[in-house]
Image (cartoon, coloured by chain):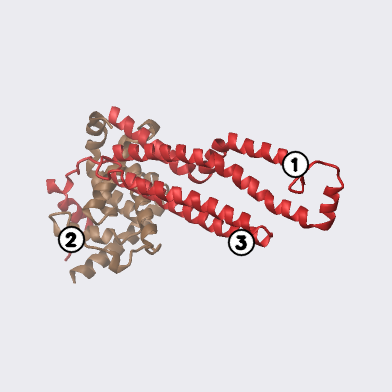
Amino acid sequence: MGKSIETIWKKGFLDSEALVAPKLNNLYNQKSKTIIDKLKRMMKVNIYVIMVFAFLNWGLYTALGTPYTGVFIFFLFMGVCWTSVKKVRTMKNIDVSLSSYDYLKSCNSWLKMAISNNTKIMRFFYPLVFLASLMPIVHALRSGEVTNAAILNSGFHLVYGIPTFTWVIAIVIAVLFYVFGGKIYKWDVDLAYSRIFRKLENMIAEMEELRNE
Amino acid sequence: MSNDFYRLSILPHVAIVIKICRAYTNAQEDFEDYYQEVCLQIWRSKDNFQEQCEWSTWVYKISLNVCMTLLKKKKKNHQYFASDALPEEAIEESHAFADESLNQLYDAIRQLSEVDRGVILLYLEEKSYQEIADIIGTNANNIGVRITRIKERLKKVLHGKVN
């Protein structure tokens, strides 16, 4: 007759080697790889989304009668993609053989550097996209007979068929986009990555606590 | 985590941590990952420990919760089936112990659902139904019925293997 499970259990663990604890080393090893891999995947997806937006905008602006603006916005978005791809490539330079802590710290520093560089680019990107987005409106106002006549009869000083004061307002808004571009970009990044950034920061903080105890 | 914390708070209960981690993993590498994660979680949750239960019960709870969560995540990642048992082909036989019967018992336990594994481990560790119910978060009557069902199932699996 077979042994009961209770007997197997008791007898099996009489052997002292059955319960040797593994060494506690490389804590966070797997986790650190997982979180950075996830971040890389998210960045990749983000780049693809921007690319799709570039094509969509091109199509949209062409449909709205401003194909050149469409091309301009397309290259603007693709430029952002190109710089992002270039930056993501530099992430590969981070030595994966480092300890988990050093690896995460390096990745975190890389992220901060990338965000800081992107902020500079985005301060120009947002105003340019804003100004470009006005072009279909300008086009519609100028090509519509009623609106065009109304503008011409308004007595306002015109630039490119549009009252100068509206250009001034547009430029002021574009300047505001430039001034607050960094904050807008930060908000944009937080929207997509805040959870993973927080997780990364918490992990580093916890590892530091572990190292210091 | 300080050496003192590990030595004084985890090492005295290391046997159960190992036994639980083994029940949720096949490969040695996974076992070590689970073990580390359990130790880390015990250290993390040390401030939440209230003396309503014994420290050992706390260690059981954390070990089981961590292992169940990690296994669920792993299953999700590998798109395993969400049923009680893993498919036959997904079960690797492990040889973590010198005693072959114990290896077979562990292989059988690994075919149970996450919760059933916890229940049978606690039963084999001679915890009372009430203690098991407290740790798992159910009532003692339920545990009695469940253990009978699990034992039947383990017997069937082990009998099948022996034959």
Q: CA distance from mark 1 to mark 3?
A: 26 Å
- Residue A3 lies, with reference to residue B130, above or below; the image says below
**Mark 3 or 2, which is nearer the eye?**
3
Q: Residue at x 40, y 36 (%)?
A: A202
Q: Secondary structure at mark 1?
A: helix
Q: CA distance from mark 2 to mark 1?
A: 90 Å
Query: In which quadrant is the N terminus of chain A drawn?
Result: bottom left
C-beta proximity under 8 Å, tags 2 and 1: no
Question: Circle 1 sits on which residue?
Answer: A166
Q: Secondary structure at mark 3?
A: helix
Chain under disc 3: A
Please, what is the three-letter code of the amino acid marked with disc 3?
A: Gly
**Mark 1 or 3, which is nearer the eye?**
1
Badge 2 crowding class, 10 Å Cα cut-off, few under 14, some 14 to 19, many 20 or more, is: few
Q: Is residue A8 left or right of residue B138?
A: left
Across and down, in percent, residue A171 comes to 67, 39
**Chain letter corresponding to the colour brown:** B
| Quarter holding residue A107 | top left
Across and down, in percent, residue A52 comes to 53, 58
Pick whichever, A86 or B160, lies toward us: A86
Across and down, in percent, residue B2 comes to 26, 30
Please, what is the three-letter code of the amino acid marked with disc 1?
A: Thr
Pick whichever, A88 or A161, lies toward us: A161
Query: In which quadrant is the C terminus of chain A drawn?
Result: top left
Pick whichever, A189 or B41, lies toward us: A189
Question: Circle 3 sits on which residue?
Answer: A59
**Mark 2 or 1, which is nearer the eye?**
1
Question: Circle 2 sits on which residue?
Answer: A3
